[in-house]
Every structure is written in structure tokens, then in C-alpha cells.
Amino acid sequence: MKNLFIFFLLPLFWTPHINAQRKYESIAQSIGLESIDKFRSFLALPNDASKPEDIFDNISWAKSELEALDFEVKTLETSALPLLLANLTVKKSRPTLAFYMHLDGQAIDQSKWDQTNPYTAVLKEKTENGFQPISWDKLRDNGAADYRIFARSSADDKGPFVMLLTALSYLKKSKKLPAFNLKLILDFEEEQSSPGLPDAVKKYKDQLLADLLLILDGPVHSSGKPTLVFGNRGIATLTLTSFGPLMPQHSGHYGNYIPNPALDLAKALASMKDNEGRVVIPGFYEGIRFDAATKKILQSVPAEEKAIKERTQTKRNDLVGNTYQESIQYPSLNIRGMRSGWVGSEARTIVPATATAELDIRLVVESDPYKLIEGVKTHLNGQGYTILDHAPSKEERMRYDRIIQMNAKVAYPAFRTDTESKGGKWLNAIFTDYYGTQAVIIRTSGGSVPISPFVSELGVPAIGVPTVNLDNNQHSPNENLRVGNYLNGIESFLAILTTKY
């Protein structure tokens, strides 16, 4: 019992002092620990976004939980997987706040995970030899806030959803109501860029309208301070494939004679950036300007360059912006994967037939995504490549010296909400009053969420309320959620839910 009491006093969020305003702290920790079994049962449901058959059990689970909390739940059919829309009307005259979350997850590579099943949650403690499994009974130990729950989607994005469910469940059991009407929008294909969402926003416009949209996704600032995110970059994807011989050829017979497509593609990719990581394609950064107000916002974010380098073990960084926060205000051009021939124990002495690179462009509000894509195409033309949107025919292969097949797609654009908007001031006031410190204001997050249609089509201002730890390995093997962040997220949602908008 003594250890349990000490654990409840542990600070789970950055605080400059003990704040008497934190009336939900012990409540959140108590109900949070009680909710862990439910969280584990949800994590146990596979949710690979590329496997629709995985998703429907997740939809049923979420629907059942929300109906138990008196939400009216509707299934909104889209051109792809459905959305769930859950409404809780407290009083018609009150404002309606929408909460967006996604409950699908990235694919898993079992060989890269340090546990038998990435969907079976494992509690781990950090040691000198890395994170080691421990019993779930140790959740009540002194220091348990720093334990981690390892499972796919623990942080991205099932964790925030269960935090919100736990806060709402407490209010119901206490016979209390939220201070505003609630609308939950659950996306089950966000990791596939939510292909059905843009048309669904138009189709169900009247049902999706709200006074403010809160996005429950992403990590808090590296300082651990409460964080508000006022924008996200959009995303476009490109697939580039270069072509060599029709079939792989013996490198002894044909090396020095048949051009190597991997080398061609490597040169094409390298030509797009200078040695400092800046894109050299004309107009790629066009329109990006920082006025005095913007500079003040960016400079107010606690410096994180040292922490990033320590965490990622990288000495140098690209010089697109003067700081990390400046750098993510620009569009980025990233090589997210490459493939040609075979490697490792499967390596073969061949000139490969093709080489393929997958790229993503993170978009900002100031950029026209189609102009950026066209800029890549124009640049490659200038480097001597013929650009096709299909695999070349025999006639095309014999006509052109260098061919690259390029296929591009704009998944969704960027969005940004004014940091001085009503919703921004309201949320910042909640965190300032509750935690005794102003939130870290992020003008634009580096990551992407597909909610820009809500902003552009519905005119709903959107703000991110991240809760998970920065080092959560989202999208990667060994994804995890820090226990302290899980419990504190519940506390933050209780503070938000009980404050009038």
C-alpha cells in the first residue's frame, strides 16, 4: 500500500511546481490503472490498415464501448472503409466539440519486434540492457510511470482513444456530464491516407459539423510539457522506377556494358538535394516566409535539437531551417524506401533489371502539391530522364537512353489554425490553469493527419492535443506507450471535458 501511495504522487507530466489545481490527478491514476485490462484487450485486436479484414473487429469493439457510454453511434459508409460517428448531446444549446482519432495501425514485421506477438501487449522496464519484460502486477510499483506498454498502436492511436473512453466512463459513473456536446469521429484507414475521407466529408457534411475539432494523435514535445499543435503537414507520395536490362544479367558478362538502373536511380535522387539536405528543385520552397509573429511562436518552443540528436544518434542535420521548428515549416522531400536486386545472404552477382524508390513530400499550407510534383518531373527531365507513367514498352526501351516511371498521388493537403483562435486560447487557458504552465505551442507539426477536409470543406478549426511520449516508435517495430503518459492523458481529458467552451 505504501508503494501505491508513492506512485500516485509521481509527476507524470512536466510541472514547475506542485499545482493544487490538479484535482483529477489521483482520480486519473486510479481509473487509469483499472482500465489497463480493457486497453490490453483492444490492443489484442489486429488492426493492420492494409488488411481490411482486420479492421471490422476494431469497429465493433469501439462501437460497443461508445454505446455503453450513451453515445449515438452511426456507421458512415465511404468509398473505402467506413467511419464511425458517435454523438453525445449534453444540451442542444451548448457548443459541439469533435474529437478525431484513428484506430488502424501500421503493418508489422514480426522479425523486428522484441516480443512474440506485437498485438499482445507487454509491460517493460528500462534497464542497462534495454527494455525488459516485467509482470503487469508491477504497475503499482514506485516508479511505474516510466514503464512502457509495448504493442502495435499502443501510442498511435489506440492509446489516446482508451484514455478518452476512461475519462468519459468516470464522468458517467460519477453522474457528471461533459461541459459541451461531443462528436467522436473514428477513422479506420488513416495509415492508408484515409482514401474515403474527403468524399465522406462532403457527403456527410451536416452530420460532421462542429465548433472545434480536436485531434488526438501524435506525441507531446520532448520537454514533456503539455502541448498543442495548430497545424499538420499534408502528404503526397511518389514512386520512381528506373529500368536496365529486361531481365537481371550476369555482372561478370555485362558489368561495364549494360547500364545499372540502381546507379541511374541513385544519381537521379541525389541530384534533387544539395550536400546540406536542401531541395534544389526551383520553386520547391516558394512562399515560405516568417513574419515577426511567426518567429516568436517558433522561438517560444523549447529547444529540442540536442534531444533529437541524442535520441536518434545522428551528429549532423539537414540545413533547411535554422532550427528544428523552422525546418518543419517547409515542405520536405524524403526517400522512404529503395529496392533493387537482392542483398545480404540473397545477394547475387547481377546487373538488376529495375530499381524503385518510394518518396514522400510533406506539404505545408503555402505549397501547391501539384506544382511540387510537377517540379520533380521537370527536374528529372532536365537530368536527361524520360518520364513515363507506365512501364516502358519494347519500343520505348529502345528509343530512350534513360527512363523513369513516375507515379504520384496527393493524399491530403496541409492545414493550419490560428494560434490566437478561440479554441487555441481556450485550450491554453485550461493547461495553464490546470498544470501551472503554458502549453508548448506548435505552429505546424512535422507529421500528417488526414483531417484537412474538415478545415477546408467544413470550415472547422482544428487543434491537436497530443498525449503520448515522443520516443514511442510509432510506425516502427517496438511501438510503445509510457504508462505515465497514458495516465496523464486521462487527467488532461478530464480537465478538458469539464471546462466550458
Image (tube, rainbow, N blue to C red):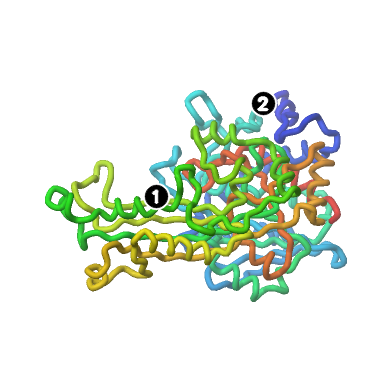
Foreground of the two, 480 or 460: 460
Foreground of the two, 145 or 226: 226
| Residue position marked by numbered label 1 in the rendering | 270
Mark 1, residues whose alpha carbon is within 10 Å: few (<14), some, or many (≥20)?
Answer: few
Rendered-image quadrant of the N terminus:
top right
Image location of residue 172, percent across then percent down? 78, 53
Total residue callouts: 2
Question: Is residue 243 at all visible to an observer of this figure?
Answer: yes
Q: Which mark is residue 408?
A: none
Image location of residue 495, percent across then percent down? 80, 46
Give the vertical position of 266 relative to 409 (above or below).
Answer: above
**Quick one: SS at disc 2?**
loop
**Quick one: SS at disc 1?**
helix
- The mark nearer the N terminus, 1 or 2, is 2
Q: Circles 1 and 2: CB distance less than 8 Å?
A: no
- In the rendered image, which quarter is residue 7 located in? top right
Q: State which mark lies toward you, 1 or 2.
A: 1
Residue that appears at 81% across and 51% down:
425
Query: Could you give the CA–CA distance between mark 1 and mark 2, rounded to whole angstroms?
Result: 51 Å
Image location of residue 471, percent across then percent down? 57, 38
Question: Is residue 172 at all visible to an observer of this figure?
Answer: no
Residue that appears at 45% across and 65% down:
408
Disc 2 marks a residue whose amino acid type is: Asn
- In the rendered image, which quarter is residue 69 located in? bottom right
Rendered-image quadrant of the C terminus:
bottom right
| Residue position marked by numbered label 2 in the rendering | 142
Disc 1 marks a residue whose amino acid type is: Ala
